[in-house]
Image (tube, helix red, strand yellow):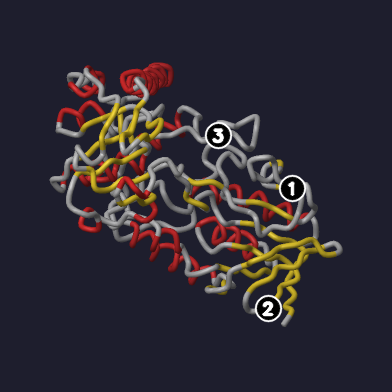
Amino acid sequence: MVEQVETLVIGGGQAGLAMSAHLGRRGLSHLVLERSRIAERWRTERWDSLVANGPAWHDRFPAATFDDIPPDAFATKDRIVTYFEDFARTIGAPIRCGEAVTALRREGEGFRAVTAGGEVVARNVVVATGPFQKPVFPPMIPESAGVMQIHSNHYRNPGQLPAGAVLVIGAGSSGSQIADELLRSGREVYLSVGPHDRPPRAYRGKDFVWWLGALGKWDARTQDPGMEHVTIAVSGAQGGHTVDFRALGNRGMRLVGRTERCEGGVLHFAPDLAANIARGDANYLSVLDEADAHVAREGLDLPEEPGARVFEPVPDCVTNPILSLDLKAAGVSAVIWATGYVLDFGWIEMDIFDGKGRPRHDKGVSEVPGLYFLGLPWLTRRASPFIWGVWHDADHLAGLIAGAGA
């Protein structure tokens, strides 16, 4: 069966729903295809206790609020799923779930998308599959090491792991939160910390996301649409708190540097732990400095917070770093790789990608007329992959589609 539509949106997460809302508002005919269920990655590819990293007043579409939780609270992953489900119903999104697009190719002046249920011919296509596509971690630790290895997208809770110590590799938002949860559960935890930014959760009575707006950082633009994402350690867990690696170390977590290699069941770490933490601290302090300067410049009445500049003592694991770890001797039974994702557009049969598999585009507009991308990091600015940021990018693309006569 071949179906014809004006605009096909591929993906039913935050990007696809934002796109549907703006196309619908303009009266533009379209169809949304979702491989599984609305917001599937929030449902099945995140840990049980995950909450949004931004407060409810911010991590949402401008057109819909979280009416059942306080604005400064952090929505649970399940609440975020129902938020998107409710939003889809409210806007009457023409979404079809359980229909994955397995191939997309150029055909005449339009496109042909292949699914298990048939084929869809469209004049325009918006690829809204998001940035979290293919989890990756290096095949560094052989199976012979006898430890369970999973990516962070398969971690659910401490009870899922075998008894013993756990090594978490990667100290961005996911890795730091998972390691903290494991430590709170009573586990012995090692955390491999690489270079990162470590912003304050809040400062002078305002959340970090507010400061990103006030300081113009949400609108920061990249010269290269494929600019690598900087690892950021931030958390909405336990009501929201600043990630502090010194505090984690002083609570008993064993911090180590960047993981380099495995030889004979022994992991070796770079001697960069202290430098990585110092870099994170410098980033943290730079945000405080910019915030203070903004308050003074604008004459804002925000309470001073000198305690924010007081750091805990440097833990022993930083002063005397562990440079190698015999997994068996240390009782490590599981390794969680919180090492991010890569894009996977192998199903798009067009020569529009760079050497790293990233689409060549200008603010979401690809080199092929009628083909657009939405929801990717730095699509137009720093805010692009976030819930409220993708809303504005979708509005822009919908306007272009409308201007082209849909």
Label 2 – label 1 distance at C-alpha: 25 Å
Q: Position of residue 142 (x, y in %)?
A: 39, 45
Badge 1 amino acid = Ile
Q: Secondary structure at mark 3?
A: loop
**Sequence-first tag of 1 and 3:** 3
Height in image: 38 above or below 165? Answer: below
Q: Quadrant of residue 25?
A: bottom right
Look at the image and tell me whether residue 216 can be seen: yes
In the image: residue 331, left or right of residue 294 = left
Estimate how packed mark 1 is, as few (under 14), some (14 to 19) or many (20 or more) residues with alpha carbons within 10 Å.
some
Residue at 20%, 57% in the rendered image: 159
Badge 3 amino acid = Glu
Label 2 – label 3 distance at C-alpha: 36 Å
Label 1 – label 3 distance at C-alpha: 19 Å
The residue under label 2 is 118
The residue under label 1 is 352
The residue under label 3 is 228
Along the viewing direction, whichever of 378 and 112 lies nearer the viewer: 112
Q: Circles 2 and 3: CB distance less than 8 Å?
A: no
**Label drawn at residue 309:** none
Height in image: 232 above or below 69? Answer: above
Q: How many marks?
A: 3
